[in-house]
Amino acid sequence: MNLYAGKILVVDLSEKKISVEPLREDWLKDYWGCWGLALRYFWDLVSPEVDPLSPENALVIMTGPFCGTLVPTSSRFCLVSKSPYTGTIFETNTGGAFGPELKFAGYDGIIIKGRAKSLTYLKIMDDQVSLESARDLKGKGIFETEKLLKERAGSPEAKTLAIGPAGENRIGFACIGTETFRQMGRGGGGALFGSKNLKGIVCRGSGKVQVADMPNFLKKVTHFKKTNLLTDANLWASTDGTAILIDVINGFGMLPTRNFTYGVFEDKAGINSDAIKAAKRGDRACASCPMACGKFTRINGAEMEGPEYETLCLAGSNCEISELEQVIRFNRLCDDLGLDTISCGNIVGLAMELTETGRHDFGLKFGEAKNYLAVVPEIANLSTPRGKLLAKGAKKVAEKYRAEDLTVESKGLEYPAYEPRGNYGMGVAYATSERGACHLRAFTAFADSPFDIEALTQNVVDGQNFNAIKWSMCICDFWGSVNHEILAELLTAGLGRKVTPRDMATAGERIWNLTRLFNLGAGFTAEEDSLPQKIMKQPLEKGPRAGKVFAEDDFDKAKQLYYKLRGWDKKGIPTKTKLAQLGLDHF
Amino acid sequence: MEKILYAIPDLCTGCNRCVYICSAVKEGAFYPSKARIHNNNFSFNGYSVPSVCFQCPKPDCLKACPREAIYKNEKDIVLVDREKCDGCGDCVTACPYGMIEQDDQGLAYKCDYCDGDPACVKECYPEAIVYRAEDKAMRKLRGLQMKQRMEAATAGEKRRQLGRNLLSLVSQ
């Protein structure tokens, strides 16, 4: 098959049964790959009411059509399931090189069902697939687990997915790690692995990915790489990496600081891209990406790939930690123990504010690194009372201490690093994302008119629809200038049949609507498309957007406009006409 | 040789585009396991070492071949005459760098510099794979790499070990 491996690996952990199914080719033209295709598979596998941590929940890991090819930045792959953290459907993706390896092994994706009796890992060596005991890996960090899984596969070049103790302990913001410093971070993929007693997956593939006409395909890839990818629009990723956003977002007055109290961080020089450059040892790339946004840093023996912008903010400015070395140490702990740094940074920031306002003493204070570092293993290992409590996440902590006024989350997922009081589009994006607050569904932070509700709401709808197909093509966020036309042309060249930009646009909207149908089935209503009190009532302090709130009236206006633009009714339910238009009327 | 293919590990980001393009050009598919160039990724250490054929002045593969199927062309590039190759695999064992292997029919294959226009070089954005005339710095770099001679392992293991040796040198 062109662009696809043509097979799906199905693993039933309860039955210890492994089978191989042909790829559902009839779904490709509507769902394409990665997010869309995983979602379509997932829809048939579970009921929306499923308990996320039960054996009845399933995980779908999926690559995309360009994965394993020279289409730049195309090595990402995703996991779709029902989140144990938010109760929504969610998609989480990562780069690295596991996706291509899986495809070279002969599989477009993996479906995981059931629950193993004891801790297990999945070994994929081309067509030799087996379940192996991981009992002796219990409690081990991701770094050591990766090394041991590769050793056991007898292949240092094998690629892995693994969880740490946080995932084994089913912590709602536990991540899945790969290639040491890359993660499926948000929404609790690690807890899902943990709930299935799946410590990890190791994969080695020696096969190939084919295209219809290689010279033509290479010509197109080279053309778009030169004329669209490697241009000023995207090359910041290569020269600076994501740390460049510290200065940019701080300049907008949108850099979450002191648990989302301020919009600027006075000590940003300690954690900005100049600080990263001063500590940089080399540039690191995911498979197939010429840009290499990863910056490998080292300070006083603490080294890692990163930290990335989100961590520099949420574990840096948001906790008022201004020493890069400490953020590196925090980030490395999270990566090894298996915690999402966005959620973890938020939760520690919240605990700092609770402590400093005298509501509850967590022994954590803004700007104080010692306890900030000590609490990370306590959370991951559930080893102290405060660790156990913080492991429940910001929403639960806020509920316990009646601190709903201090926490920032939508649908239970803590906020990423773009202050919505400084840009209303980000607020609409967070409130309407299928997986809770997320900056990777729609991104309006760079809009010229940050408070123009009409224009920004339209931007959010367009952004969500576009990213739904972009993530379904497994293209990275940082190919920011890619568009429907380029995706369609590359697919046409690779598949050897005509694909149009309109096919791409419709698929994006279809995928977004299908996630909505799932969430409605899971019991979510318009009420949960919401913003926290802090954003609606407490004015942002400091910086160019100081004094701003995203008031409830304004937000409600934006929400109703959003539903209207989507072709949904006032309760946020897709209309029959919209579903018919997208071919979803039978769902 | 007028120009030599050099690998500069310090600049390599581990993106594997050299491997992908090599297999696309030589095999007509994205087929990393059959590429003539490889990459050894040490993600934990943030380091990657590309494996290239050195086109050795005194090639061990050529010396080991009992059928004289391996020869040097007029540009000093080491090539395999696949008509003469009988698939004995002695060259694979002999190459200390793991840079000659056997295909599904057992016949030997290796990097041929794409007849003087290596595809991998054009694909390498960080310029970790370069094709240029020798100078002092490049001679030193290549000399250091060629000194890491591996024995008694598969081609992949030899490449990996060479990479590990170079990593330990920069880590010191």
Image (cartoon, coloured by chain):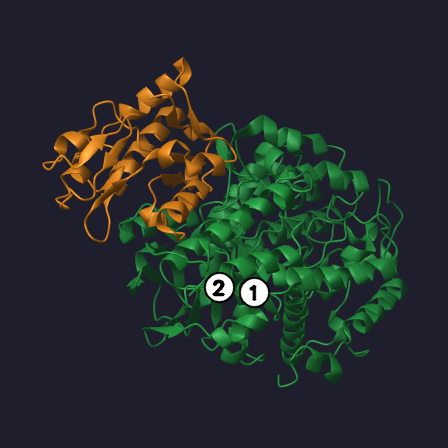
Q: Position of residue B61 (x, y in %)?
A: 19, 33
Q: Residue at x 85, y 57 (%)?
A: A550
Chain with colour orange in the figure: B
* Picture disc at residue B70: none
- Mark 1 residue element: helix
Question: Looking at the figure, which quarter contains the C terminus of chain A?
Answer: bottom right
Question: Looking at the figure, which quarter contains the N terminus of chain A?
Answer: bottom left
Density class for disc 1 (Cα within 10 Å; few <14, some 14-19, many ≥20) is: many
Density class for disc 2 (Cα within 10 Å; few <14, some 14-19, many ≥20) is: many
Q: Is residue B96 left or right of residue A17?
A: left
Tags 1 and 2 on a common chain: yes
Give the residue type that dot 2 points to: Met
Residue A2 appears in the picture as rendered: yes
Give the residue type that dot 1 points to: Trp
Q: Position of residue B157 (x, y in %)?
A: 25, 40
Q: Is residue A19 left or right of residue A316?
A: left
* Picture disc at residue A35: 1
Q: Residue at x 43, y 70 (%)?
A: A112
Lower position in the chain sequence, tag 1 or tag 2: 1
In the image, A479 versus B90, the foreground residue is B90
- Mark 2 residue element: strand
Q: Chain of mark 2?
A: A
Whether residues under marks 1 and 2 lie with C-beta atoms below 8 angstroms apart, the answer is: yes
Please identify which colour was used for chain A in the image. green
Residue A383 appears in the picture as rendered: no
In the image, A371 versus A78, the foreground residue is A78
Q: What residue sits right under mark 2 in the picture? A: A62
Q: Is residue B88 above or below residue A466?
A: above
Q: Is residue A562 above or below residue A371?
A: below
